[in-house]
Amino acid sequence: MTSLLITNIGELMTQDREHRVLADAAVVLEGERISWIGAASAAPAADEEYDAGGRACLPGWVDSHTHLVFAGDRTAEFEARMAGQSYAAGGISVTVDATRRATDEELAQLVTARAAEAAAGGTTYLETKTGYGLDVDEEARGARIAAKVADEVTFLGAHLVPDGWAADDYVQLVTGAMLSAVRPYAQWADVFCETGAFTPDQSREVLRACRDAGLGLRVHGNQLGPGGGVQLAVELEAASVDHVNYLGRPDVDALAGSWSSWDSGAGRRGTVATCLPACDLSTRQPLAPARKLLDAGVEIAIASNCNPGTSYTTSMGFCVATAVLQMGLTVHQAVRAATFGGALALHREQGNDDDGARAVGSLAVGHRADLQLFSAPSATHLAYRPGMQLTHAVWRKGIRVA
Ligand SMILES: N=CN[C@@H](CCC(=O)O)C(=O)O
Ligand SMILES: [Zn+2]
């Protein structure tokens, strides 16, 4: 197995349990794992050496919320929104029509290109969802294509009630034939719990059926107004509730309470609040209260939510910069949310040489060798020089991918 020493790292932000940030550091990759981290002056010899030239090194981004399986775009809807119209769930049906018209080859090519774009921007672990098929065959097709490209696949048959369906009948389809068809390809289930999509009761029914089928749970909640999504996510011990734009005190308290028995890396995980800064800008919603959530003791993640309706970007760097500049996070907190936080939201933050399922989202011995180098001496430049392309090199499972 070949080893690679990456040395002369100006700043190494590990996002490990101790939140270490090392200056003049080095890291050794051995196969797909990290085998050593420390001061460059103490680094062991390796088969190959890479001089980072004083650049900053971070874990690769963990993008825990995307919708990459789609065809067409929604430029006209975006333009109308920028002219003052508000976002509504109904726009999803435009993408459903375009996606159903695409051939398998076209759809696979689109998803692959989007995942490659994400990797070029430093994303090394990627979740993606179905949700633009909305019938049994189309949802299964979306999941099958997603599973070839993404690290984690989420079943989002409950994205919108399609035209011509009564909501309760559609919920029966989602929890019956659709779930069975998608199940072989998915690890997670999600539901859009919002006015215009699914009520909390309908969402609960979908999520319970998916949990009984062995899927982990996630929720789109409190995006367009106050609602029951957050409370439902906590009630069902979902891994994450995403969007979280409109939160009352009871919502923040419920999320914080879910983390009360967790000790930064050990114990029962709570429900992560996943913030989607690019989506908040594109929909002109109030930004998710990331600062308030952190202060209350809630674990947060930052994800791109790449989709054609509300957030057509895979750029996690942009999301991190926005979280710093607009949501009041420090650079370290925002990077943590986009790496360790994403891993936590996907239950992938633990694991080392002992148990085989290597952790992602943080840099430590035994963790997966997923990391990125920036064309800058510190991660601070992400927010200090917003909009600049700062990705210099990316390794995923120890292999250089960008
Ligand atoms: N909010 C629900 N789903 C997507 C948007 C889907 C769409 O508008 O196409 C989101 O996460 O923002
Ligand atoms: Zn989404």
Image (cartoon, rainbow, N blue to C red):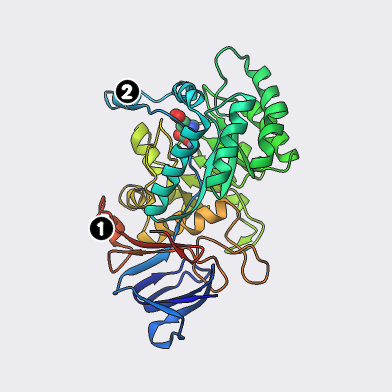
Badge 2: how crowded within 10 Å, few (<14), some, or many (20+)? few
- Residue 230 visible, this angle: no
Q: Is residue 368 left or right of residue 122?
A: right
Q: Which mark is residue 66?
A: none
Q: Is residue 233 left or right of residue 19?
A: right
Q: Where is residue 233? Give x, y as percent.
A: 61, 40
Q: Residue 61, located in which quarter of the rendered image?
A: bottom left
Work out whether mark 2 precedes mark 1 in sequence or the reverse, and give the earlier one.
2
- Residue 210 visible, this angle: yes
Q: Where is residue 222? Give x, y as percent.
A: 50, 34
* 2 or 1: mark nearer the eye: 2
Badge 1: how crowded within 10 Å, few (<14), some, or many (20+)? few
Q: Relative to the observer, which residue lies in front, 283 or 62? A: 62
> Which quadrant is home to the C terminus?
bottom left
Q: Would you say the residues marked 2 and 1 are in contact, meaning their CB atoms lie under 8 Å apart?
A: no
- Residue drawn at x 42%, y 43% is 114
Q: Which mark is residue 384?
A: 1
Disc 2 is placed on an element classified as helix
Label 2: which residue?
76
Disc 1 is placed on an element classified as helix
Q: Relative to the observer, which residue lies in front, 288 or 135? A: 135
- Residue drawn at x 36%, y 63% is 393
Seen from this angle, which residue lies furthest right?
212
